[in-house]
Amino acid sequence: MLDKIQLQLLKEVADLDQLPAGAVNIRVNGKAAIRNSTANIEITSKEDGSGIDIRIRPGTRKESVHIPVVLSQTGLKETVYNDFYIGDDCDLVIVAGCGIDNCGGLNSEHDGVHRFQIGRNCRVKYIEKHFGSGSGTGKRILNPGTVVKLGENSVMQMEMTQIRGVDHTVRDTKAELAAGASLIVRERLLTHQDQTAESSYQISLNGPGSNADLVSRGVARDHSVQTLNLGISGNARCSGHTECDSIILDQARILAVPSLEANDPDASLVHEAAIGRIAGEQIIKLMTLGLTETEAEEEIIRGFLR
């Protein structure tokens, strides 16, 4: 039975008001609390207890997998490895994410590594949200790792969001794309107070006709620090695009490091970057509609990260 805080964390990171239909594995304070497999999706624990294996049968379509994690115990630190084996011709949605509520004086940390083996002709949507709350002095630490091997003519859409309240995070994402495969990434990142966030992507376009579109949007406030490393390697006839678009406020710092590596004369790679403060005319326009300056700034930030 989940308590009120744990249910609120699930709402924040997985939009769950009740148990979803389909395959589900909910991890609470280091243990599997709820699990359900389906005829096409099997979830099993790893023998050493360090995570789960998710096996999706070829041809599985219009199904979902929910694997959120919540921590409400101060001082808990865990590393979890989740492996997805997705057969050919699948079409599914995977909802992950982690929420930490820390009301104590010790650091709480979840390091989750998700590894995807995706077959041919698949469409996979992957949603990962991170959220922190709690009145304690202990930190809320989340270090996600994602490794993707994308099969021929498959498409993967990734929505990577850090909502708020995470004191420290290091996100490391690696992907290898076969011929005709497509990877679309949309990252949204909000930091404030003294929080630090480092986000690193290394995408290898290995097959002819492969392509990647990586867009990161961030807002850094107060004394927070964001570091973005966006890298694409073109190793065949391919196309790749990275974009960093950030708003900086107060005494925050943002470092954006693009990396484009072309190892084939038919590789077409592009990077765009913009870092700046909110334009004054945007705030003035909203203030003429009755908003205070603070309300106008918050509305602009919400729209920017939407």
Image (tube, helix red, strand yellow):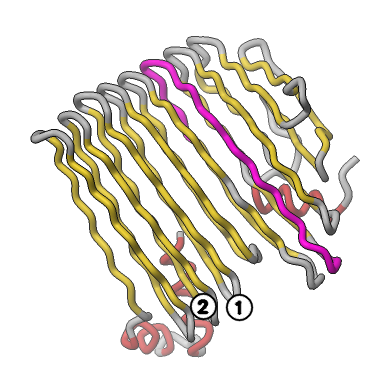
Which is more toward the observer, 242 or 161? 242
Left or right for 15, reference 74: left
Which is more toward the observer, 130 or 30? 30
Q: Position of residue 7 (x, y in %)?
A: 79, 49
Q: Position of residue 256 (x, y in %)?
A: 35, 64
Q: Position of residue 215 (x, y in %)?
A: 35, 52
Left or right for 281, reference 90: left
Which residue is label 1 attached to?
Answer: 193
Residue at x 31%, y 35% (from the top left corner):
204
The magenta stretch spans residue 107: yes
Left or right for 121, reference 240: right
Give the crowd class for mark 1: few <14, some 14-19, many >=20 residues within 10 Å.
some
Callout 1, which amino acid?
Gln
Q: Position of residue 127 (x, y in %)?
A: 53, 41
Decide whether the magenta segment is chiefly helix, strand or loop. Answer: strand
Circle 1: element type? loop
Q: Residue 149 shows which numbered tag? A: none
Which is more toward the observer, 228 or 157? 228
Q: CA distance from mark 1 to mark 2?
A: 7 Å
Circles 1 and 2, Cβ within 8 Å, touching? The answer is: yes
Toward which corner of the image does residue 25 lie, by quadrant?
top right
Which residue is label 2 attached to?
Answer: 221
